[in-house]
Image: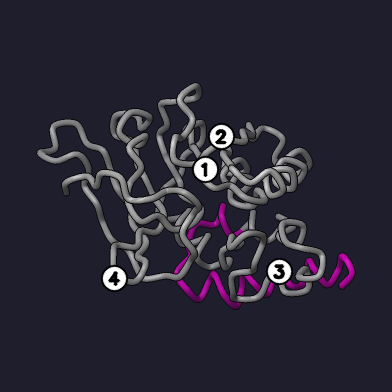
């Protein structure tokens, strides 16, 4: 597929997948028309980069389907200059999307192969992203606190680092799969004076594999 065909595929993705599915944030639509998603997947899968499906990366990881990424980013209500930690940033697509929205992005990835692809991608398309390779369950203390913690994949429980690294009035978003249940997209908000740790809203059911090594530790009480 040549460059013009990728441009056409991006426009079709936006017009046929995102806009009919209530993605109304024009910033997200414009960025996803221009961000070359095909560079975030294996070369042999580039022709499928704009299909309405998740694509395999490495070791059970995937690049989530475009609509899932757009829905989660829109639900996060990102604002310029906010600090976001992208946990499981893989090949950098979502991190770059947040950076193009004007956020201060810290990308955390444990897989060195994926991190290298993501760092190279962001150097060209979102050079303000700060990349870190390390274990996902610990977050990244040195750059905290975060206005937003974004899990670019599914978790089975909230890692305890969210307790310490989320700013006051901060938000957590991603997919949560409780035992025996289907994964659900969620938005968790830390609110001053709220009687419990977080106020959690479940948004919609979705499919994504669990991020590595984020095992259930201690579930927050909602």
Number of the front mark, 4 or 1: 4
The residue to which callout 1 is attached is 86
Q: Are marks 4 and 1 in contact (CB under 8 Å)?
A: no
The nearer-to-camera label among 4 and 2 is 4
Q: Secondary structure at mark 1?
A: strand
Q: CA distance from mark 1 to mark 2?
A: 6 Å
Q: Main secondary structure of the magenta part?
A: helix
Q: Which mark is residue 49?
A: 3
Residues marked 4 and 3 touching at CB (< 8 Å): no
Q: Earlier in the sequence, mark 4 or mark 1?
A: 1
Nearest to N terminus: mark 4 or mark 3: 3
Q: Residue at x 76, y 38 (%)?
A: 123
Q: Quickly name the residue at label 2.
A: 106
Quarter of the rendering occupied by the N terminus: bottom right
Instruction: State how far apart marks 3 and 2 are (Cα).
Output: 24 Å
Q: Is residue 113 above or below residue 2?
A: above
Alpha carbon separation for disc pair 4 and 3: 31 Å
User: What percent of the width, then of the height, locates residue 109?
Assistant: 59, 42
Q: Residue at x 29, y 62 (%)?
A: 178
**Residue 13 percent coordinates (x, y):** 64, 72
Name the element at disc 4: loop
């Amino acid at each position: 597929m040549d460059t013009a065909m990728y441009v056409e595929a991006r426009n079709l993705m936006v017009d046929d997948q995102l806009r009919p599915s209530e993605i109304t944030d024009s910033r997200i639509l414009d960025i996803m028309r221009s961000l070359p998603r095909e560079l975030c997947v294996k070369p042999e899968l580039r022709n499928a980069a704009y299909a309405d499906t998740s694509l395999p990366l490495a070791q059970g990881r995937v690049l989530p389907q475009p609509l899932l990424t757009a829905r989660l980013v829109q639900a996060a209500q990102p604002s310029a200059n906010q600090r976001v930690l992208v946990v499981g940033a893989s090949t950098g697509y979502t991190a770059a999307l947040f950076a193009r929205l004007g956020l201060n992005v810290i990308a955390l990835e444990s897989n060195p192969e994926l991190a290298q692809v993501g760092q190279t991608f962001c150097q060209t398309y979102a050079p303000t992203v700060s990349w870190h390779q390390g274990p996902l369950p610990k977050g990244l203390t040195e750059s905290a606190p975060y206005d937003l913690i974004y899990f670019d994949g599914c978790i089975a429980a909230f890692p305890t680092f969210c307790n310490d690294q989320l700013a006051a009035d901060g938000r957590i978003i991603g997919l949560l799969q409780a035992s025996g249940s289907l994964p659900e997209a969620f938005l968790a908000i830390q609110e001053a004076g709220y009687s419990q740790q977080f106020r959690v809203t479940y948004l919609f059911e979705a499919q994504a594999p669990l991020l590595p090594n984020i095992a259930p530790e201690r579930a927050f009480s909602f």
